[in-house]
Amino acid sequence: MTTANPLFRPDLLAKYNANGPRYTSYPTALQFRDDFDPGAYLRAAADPGASALDLSLYFHIPFCDTVCFYCGCNKIATKNRAHALPYLERLKREIALQAACFDTRRPVSQLHLGGGTPTFMSNDELAELLATAREHFAFVPDDEAEYSIEVDPREASPETIAHLRKLGFNRLSLGVQDFDPLVQKAINRIQPPDMTASVMQAARHAGFHSIGVDLIYGLPHQTVESFSRTLDTMIELAPDRLSVFAYAHMPQLFKMQRRMDAATLPSPAMRLAILQRVVERLSAAGYVYIGMDHFALPTDELARAQAQRTLHRNFQGYSTRAECDLIGFGASSIGKVGDVYAQNAKELPAYAAAIDAGKLAITRGVRLSADDRLRRDIITQLMCNLELRFDEFEAMYGIHFADTFEPELERLRGFEQDGLVSLSNRKLEVQTAGRMLVRNIAMVFDHYLGQQTLERFSRTV
């Protein structure tokens, strides 16, 4: 069974559909240890050998005005905006604590505010946060940087968008999920198309470099016809990037998902049909399929970076800034410094207690082994550039690739027979039909999959 679009092979998507990591890190967060020594993070931050790398800053703002029933993020739903001020004060103290660990002459070329809803903070509070960050770190000029923020169109006026641009943000990520009124009611997110269009128009007027939009398929009441209308509206709005995520229904982990009627969720066959329509419509509209859930216009940085083999992947997803050390600020945020991953306390009271005591809020993490580093680089190359050139890994790690990964390459023969990859003596290349299953291909190189519960991960399709 095939379709006119070689990217979408429903027979193979059904065959390989399974639970698996999204590989925003390797090892994944499930391998982070509660007995992690924060001293490992401090030593990695102070390592003079890392001073040639740029810095990336991530701020987690956990507050939301209302809760979306599908959401699995670490968030706090409250209408009390007064919660933002004490959180801001602790973020400012954390900035100083983290800055003391690094050579702050290192340039910051990437910044991301996520959540929750970062614009839960007032314009003045956001300005104060950015001013503090700039006092302690060296930000590169606008045309050399990727400074992004997630925005909820339901609470972002054109004035707010203009203010964010003045603060230095040059990339905007908008949550939409679906324009259908019935779906919006079921997920507790009422957001008329005009509201989203107004924010996008304001962002273009303000001079944002790139506008990205998130959609989700697999939500209650969705059909091919209803989601086609959402796609048509979105194509008219013409964002630079689109992320079309598969909804992961895990009510055992996220209790708010129990507020949705599971009987109204589309069947697996319907989800696959919706995904097919996504691929068809966005491809016809000129979007390039980057990988996994991401599409971008050919003029967007993501598409250009992939063509130039400079695309990267971190905890925020695909990125054009490779080889940065990532500093995480706020409750639950994750940093990556050298060969160390470190995560702050997830719960707000524990995070606050650590910062109030004048300490970093790191509670868990992992230091990568030599095998971890090698496999991380392999998985990153697969996820971003859709190929492995064996000689590059042999030169960097002093291995003979075919010998070191003989079991993995043997497992990939089945993928090759299905037309998902091509294998030669010197190269593994993901074929067009394999691009939507790149997570499954990467999973072959994951040393830990047999040791962890796959139900904790979302479906690969």
Image: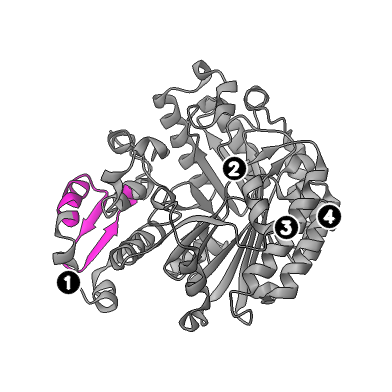
**C-alpha gap between disc 2 and disc 4:** 23 Å
Residue lying farthest top? 263
For badge 3, the amino acid type reads Arg
Q: How many marks?
A: 4
- Residue that numbered label 3 is attached to: 90
- Give the quarter of the figure containing the N terminus: top left
Q: Is residue 442 above or below residue 370?
A: above
| The disc label shown at residue 26, or none | none
Q: Name which quarter of the figure residue 339 lies in.
A: bottom left
**C-alpha gap between disc 2 and disc 3:** 18 Å
| The disc label shown at residue 123, or none | 4
Q: Is there CB contact under 8 Å for labels 2 and 4?
A: no
Answer whether residue 162 is visible to the viewer in this image. no
Of circles 2 and 4, the one toward us is 2
Answer whether residue 261 is visible to the viewer in this image. yes
| Boundaries of the magenta span | 408-434
For marks 4 and 3 on the same chain, the one whose residue lies earlier in the sequence: 3
For badge 4, the amino acid type reads Asn
For marks 1 and 4 on the same chain, the one whose residue lies earlier in the sequence: 4
Q: Is residue 136 left or right of residue 401?
A: right
- Residue that numbered label 1 is attached to: 400
For marks 2 and 4 on the same chain, the one whose residue lies earlier in the sequence: 2
For badge 2, the amino acid type reads Asn
Circle 1 sits in a helix, a strand or a loop, which is it? loop
- Residue that numbered label 2 is attached to: 74
Of circles 2 and 3, the one toward us is 3
Q: Is residue 301 left or right of residue 205?
A: left
